[in-house]
Structure formats: C-alpha cells, structure tokens
Image: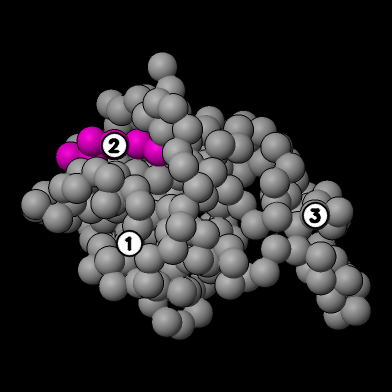
Amino acid sequence: MVRNGLKEELLADALGVADTDGALVLIRHGETDWNAAGRLQGRTDVPLNDVGRAQARQAGAALAGGGWDLLVSSPLQRAVETATLIGAAAGLELALTLPGLLERNYGRSEGEYLNGLSEPEMTRIFGVAEAEDAVAERGAAALRRLVDEHPGRRIIAVAHGTLIRLTMSALLGRQHPRVPNAQAVPVDLELLRQHPAGTAPAATAALA
C-alpha cells in the first residue's frame, strides 16, 4: 500500500518506536524538470518543480508525528528545498547540509538526455562518472559520522536517488532498487555501524 508516495511498510519501519539507538530515514528529493525530462543531473544544481514541491509536502505530512528531532540534507538546492518543505510539515528546521550526501558526480555528462540511448552511448556517458564504489563509501561514511555525532537522535536525511541506492546496496550487500522522488528509505543502524567506517567530509555550519 502507498500513502502520499511512501510505501506503508517502509514508513512504518521508519517511524517505529523511539528507542535509545535513535533512527535514520533517507528521503530522495522531489521531482525536478530534469527528472521529468530524463536528463542526468548529478551535481548540477537544478531546483524542484511544482510536482516536486508537492511531493516534498506529502512526504513531510507522512513523516509528521514520528518523533523526528534532526533534519539534514545534501547541499544541492533540490535537496535543501525538499528538506525545508518536509520540515515545515513535520515541525523541524533544517539543521545541517552534508557534502557527503551530494549526488554522484557525472562530470561533463551532466545534462545529457538518457531516454532511448544505445549501449555504447550509455557507456560513454557513464564512463566519466564518479565510481559507484566511491559514491557508496562516501554516503555510508557521511551517515555513519552523522549518527555517531548525534547518538539517540531520530534523523531525516534528504539526499539523491543514485547516492541512496548505491549506499543502501553497500550496507545491505545486495542491489537496492531505484528510489522514486520523495520516497522514504529507512536505514538499519546496526548495519550502518557494522559497515567499515570511512572518512566523511565535514558538515557545514548549522543553518539559521
């Protein structure tokens, strides 16, 4: 069953019952015009469109009442705006932006249209991208540092589809499916703690 674009079973796991170990849920940002057009975004700072803003508000309404007490995001504006809209619905202010949650870097391929491309064309486009293993380790390290620095907190982290998918695949030891816009993905904190710790980029200063 789906409510406000969030799978009920995932949402139930994410909300859970507050405990001393805290909780962590990842949310992919809402839709952008480049998402709708099938363009590769990566680090290009594309804003949300109206559909994406509505998705963010729905995600916030679905998460409201879950006892969340810390809201963070990637520094890219589509993630920051999604987090801000979620926070407005859930009664939280955006506290930090984390460089470790930035989307995969696709270099000069950013802006390319992906629909209908041949296999050689896809190879060319993704051949210049940040390595998948590097993305996964960067994401896992950022999340590990986040929960270590905020023990017992219930955290919402807004990030990006490929970053979330690759990080979760690394934590789970199996392929994680594609993450739709504004979808909630709960993180097993025990798996995160067991994952080899890397070095995450330092967080930015708290936002006003």
Front position among marks 3 and 1: 3
Quarter of the rendering occupied by the N terminus: bottom left
Quarter of the rendering occupied by the C terminus: top left
> CA–CA distance between discs 3 and 1?
29 Å
Q: Residue furthest front?
A: 199
Residue stretch in magenta: 66-72
> Which residue was labeled with disc 3?
107
Of labels 2 and 1, earlier in sequence is: 2
> CA–CA distance between discs 2 and 3?
32 Å
Could you say which disc has been placed on residue 70 in the image?
2
Residue at x 35%, y 57% (from the top left corner): 144
Q: Amino acid at mark 1?
A: Val
> Which residue was labeled with disc 1?
187
> Are dots 2 and 1 in contact, CB under 8 Å?
no
Q: Residues within 10 Å of mark 1 (few under 14, many from 20)?
A: some
Left or right? Give the position of 34 relative to 144. Answer: right
Q: Amino acid at mark 3?
A: Gly
